[in-house]
Image (cartoon, grey):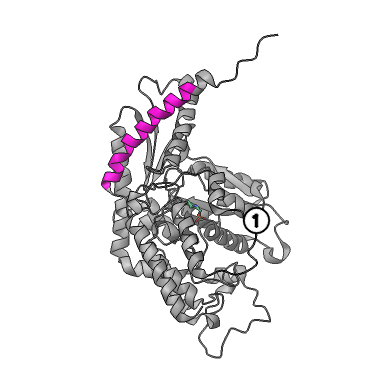
Amino acid sequence: MDPERFRELGYRTVDRIAEFLKGLRERPVTPGESPAEVRAHLGNGALPERGAAPEELLEEAWRLLAGHSLLNGHPRFLGYVTSSAAPLGALADLAAAAVNPNVGGWTLAPMASEIEAQTVRWIAEFLGYPPSCGGLLVSGGNMANFVGFLAARRAKAEWDIRAEGAGCRRMTVYASSETHTWVQKAADLSGLGTQSIRWIPADRDFRMDLSELRRAIEADRAAGHLPFLVVGSAGTVSTGAVDPLPALAEIAQEHGLWFHVDGAYGAPAAALPDAGEDLRGLRYADSLAVDPHKWFYAPLEAGCTLVRDARRLQETFDYSPAYYHFDGEEEEQRLNYYALGPQNSRGFRALKVWLGLRAAGREGLARMIGDDIRLSRLLHREVQKREDLEALTQGLSVTTFRYVPRGVDRTDPAAAARLNELNEQLLNRIQAGGEAFLSNAVIEGKFALRACIVNFRTEQADIQALPEIVTRLGRETEAALAATSAIGRPAPPTAG
Ligand SMILES: *Cc1c(COP(=O)(O)O)cnc(C)c1O
């Protein structure tokens, strides 16, 4: 592709994107198509034998993507912990891909490596974590937590675990029952096995129970195991609960354990002026995971691990192979990211994060995060006002609630299963309908609708419209369920 052609196609692509962004609010959040419908749009042609004109390909690709995607940039997308992406990030990714630095080695990516280092330091500063820390960008929260986990395992094993593996003695991890599933993957992939995880019960506010934690560590010690890691959550996925991080840090220190904080979602809220001491306690972590593709509004993918003692990453990952000669001549040490994490070749993820931080500034970013939290609290209040909705939890920017039709006694155990089914079906209806997008949580056995606002496009009016949408679809769901249970239910088995 010659440069003039690139210019022409690029302008056209940017024009399409700009129109798309302009029209987001007018579109359904999702077309709600089935896999078969989506495949039918795509077609099932074989790998093309001959090439085709990029102009048509780009147009077709855009048509497929823009017309048949869930739009997490939509102001009424409030699902999971997926954020709306700053448009600046899309331009950053284009620029990063065009220069294509390989941020595995400094020599291959001099400026990009330095920008990543600066980005990591700024993230630490924003979160109130010591800026002298080490760190790097990875693909997301799972990998960011995994990197912290591996650093802990390397640091706390009493033998050369990188050479000998995990078999010598059981190493045990302490995480609350509300912890994200990354911890299972990490225990599994690191060779410790998921049986190394001690699931510590959570209290009524979904925070780790401290006396249970102490008891579990002591029991493992007594049994001859090697407790090595306490995992705290700075914002759980289900309810946005924040573990008492300073207390966890103290217990970890008392027992000589590594303290890791999963702040994939909630860590950025520590930068708010009214952040509580429990959340600010993330500064005591030996390692901390945070997801720039969540509350820093970077496009996917960008996760980040910070490690208090910068040497820990190199101790965990470096093998300095003979075929790399990256050290240069000068005294100054060169930053070779391949030696600090699991990846070898690495893309320039940092650019979109770095630009996002600069464009918003500390003040702008804190304001957007604060707005999301305020909107979530507003939703909780709006839900409380309605007779046919039951507000369940509110933490950070997560509100959970459920639809309870008038006349149903929500404390009646016989109604519990029915309410769960009703709300599960309702969620399906909401998700397919495209008016707004919610996800779910299970709160003390109750199937709940869950709105998590990580979205700078959501406005007060979007939140105020939500209870009405939910109750209308709730009534429709109820009617549909009543119809199927009258007509569609198989006949009960006859006696004999
Ligand atoms: C999102 C999330 C993760 C996983 O992060 P990914 O970016 O999806 O890999 C882990 N922990 C928490 C608390 C999260 O919110």
| Residue under pointer 1 | 189
Give the residue drawn at x 49%, y 56%: 64
Asked whether 319 falls inside the magenta stretch, the response is no
Whether ligand 1 has any atom under 8 Å from the Cβ at mark 1 is answered as no
Q: Give the range drawn in magenta.
A: 460-483
Asked whether 469 falls inside the magenta stretch, the response is yes
Which secondary structure class fits the magenta region best?
helix
Q: Quadrant of residue 155?
A: bottom right
Position in image of residue 451 (x %, y %) = 39, 43
Give the residue drawn at x 63%, y 53%: 187
Position in image of residue 467 (x %, y %) = 32, 36
Residue 307 shows in this picture: no
In this picture, residue 86 sits left or right of residue 238: left
Q: Point out the residue furthest to the bottom here.
A: 329
Badge 1: few (under 14), some or many (20 or more) residues near its Cα, within 10 Å? Answer: few
**Vertical comparison of 150 with 94: above or below:** above
**Vertical comparison of 205 with 161: above or below:** above
* Mark 1 residue type: Leu
Query: 421 and 305: which one is in front?
Result: 421
Q: In which quarter of the image is the C terminus?
A: top right
Q: Quadrant of residue 380?
A: top left
